[in-house]
Image (cartoon, coloured by chain):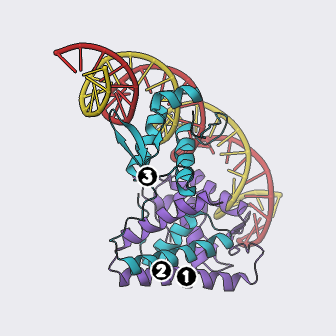
Chain colours: A cyan, B purple, C yellow, D red
DNA sequence: TTCTTTGTATCAAATACTTAGTACATTGAT
DNA sequence: ATCAATGTACTAAGTATTTGATACAAAGAA
């Protein structure tokens, strides 16, 4: 099975990114619960008609993001959604996340894209240089 | 003058995109008011040490987005933030800045540095993108 | 008109990204 | 100990993106 994952080779979004996005969505939505094992890179690649390395790349980025975890022989399993990577300060965290979400919501309502929201934050932080 | 614009050639973000992002941010924040004239593609390119076509590309995309307007001999001037069918765009902008400032204030209160605030925003942007 | 300054168009070259294939390392099962 | 299934590393090839240079078009100024 493909675990509900599909790729469109004609899309401008590269296959590895489509996979990463779909797995992230499925985990966020709850369709892939923590502990669920994902298909192996080879089997998913075969089902999708692409190379194993392409699936491996998606898995690697997902692991870096903390969404999944790979064990050599045991395959790859879902961990869950990461908690924004904060020094876990229960109340402070919830408050902060609520604040950033309000900012995002207002930005989206104003028609701004992700890059613009990041740029505005930088300007307000007083950073003049773009990084990353 | 560069109107407060700078590019980092080592960045993974291409120069034309850095320019587009910075101009968008400066307009959204109010540092570039409607009517302000931007530097010519040649002078900004010379100041930044890049080719005129690169600046031109950024300007073209900004014009397509409705943020700026170009007149042949008169150069390029700021129009303002496009209002996405919302009440007054001035209010929307002020609202947005207030929101990002609240976020920054809460983050600072929690002892977070600039990098952490940017990282949290990125994580949340990734999440909200899935919900669309 | 003629000049000068502006943005635009185009295209070749450079650069970066993505993929597929192959060989390798790891690890639990037999 | 051996096997088999897993993820990983590496690399060459193809593809896409980005840039820089040049020539062009528009339009106000002299």
Q: Residue B20: horizontal and vertical position, in percent?
A: 58, 62
Residue B43 visible in rendering: no
Question: Eyeballing the image, is A24 above or below B4?
Answer: above
Q: Secondary structure at mark 1?
A: helix
Front tag of 2 and 3: 3
* Foreground pick, A34 / B20: A34
Q: Residue A82: horizontal and vertical position, in percent?
A: 42, 60
* Foreground pick, C23 / D21: C23
> In the rendered structure, are the residues bearing label 1 and label 2 in contact, judged by CB atoms less than 8 Å apart?
yes
Q: What is the chain letter for disc 2?
A: B
Taking the spot 49% from the left edge, 84% from the top edge, the residue there is B102
Q: What is the chain letter for disc 3?
A: A
Marking on residue B103: 2
Residue A32 in the figure: left or right of residue C3: left
Taking the spot 63% from the left edge, 81% from the top edge, the residue there is B93
Residue B16 in the figure: left or right of residue A108: left
Task: Identify residue for label 3.
Answer: A67
Q: Residue A9: horizontal and vertical position, in percent?
A: 64, 33
Residue A44 visible in rendering: yes
Question: Eyeballing the image, is B13 above or below B128?
Answer: above
> Label 2 vs label 3: CA separation?
25 Å
Looking at the rendered image, the quarter that the C terminus of chain B falls into is bottom right
Residue B32 picture quarter: bottom right
Task: Identify residue for label 1.
Answer: B99
* Foreground pick, A17 / B73: A17
């Amino acid at each position: 099975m493909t675990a509900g994952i599909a790729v469109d080779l004609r899309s401008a979004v590269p296959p590895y990114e489509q996979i990463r996005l779909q797995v992230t969505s499925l985990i966020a939505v709850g369709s892939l619960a923590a502990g669920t094992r994902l298909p192996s890179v080879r089997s998913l690649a075969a089902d999708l008609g692409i190379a194993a390395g392409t699936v491996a790349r998606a898995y690697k980025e997902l692991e870096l993001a903390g969404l999944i975890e790979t064990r050599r022989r045991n395959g790859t399993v879902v961990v869950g959604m990461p908690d924004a990577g904060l020094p876990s300060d229960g109340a402070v965290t919830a408050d902060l996340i609520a604040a950033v979400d309000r900012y995002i919501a207002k930005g989206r309502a104003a028609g701004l894209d992700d890059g613009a929201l990041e740029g505005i934050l930088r300007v307000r932080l007083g950073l003049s240089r773009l990084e990353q």
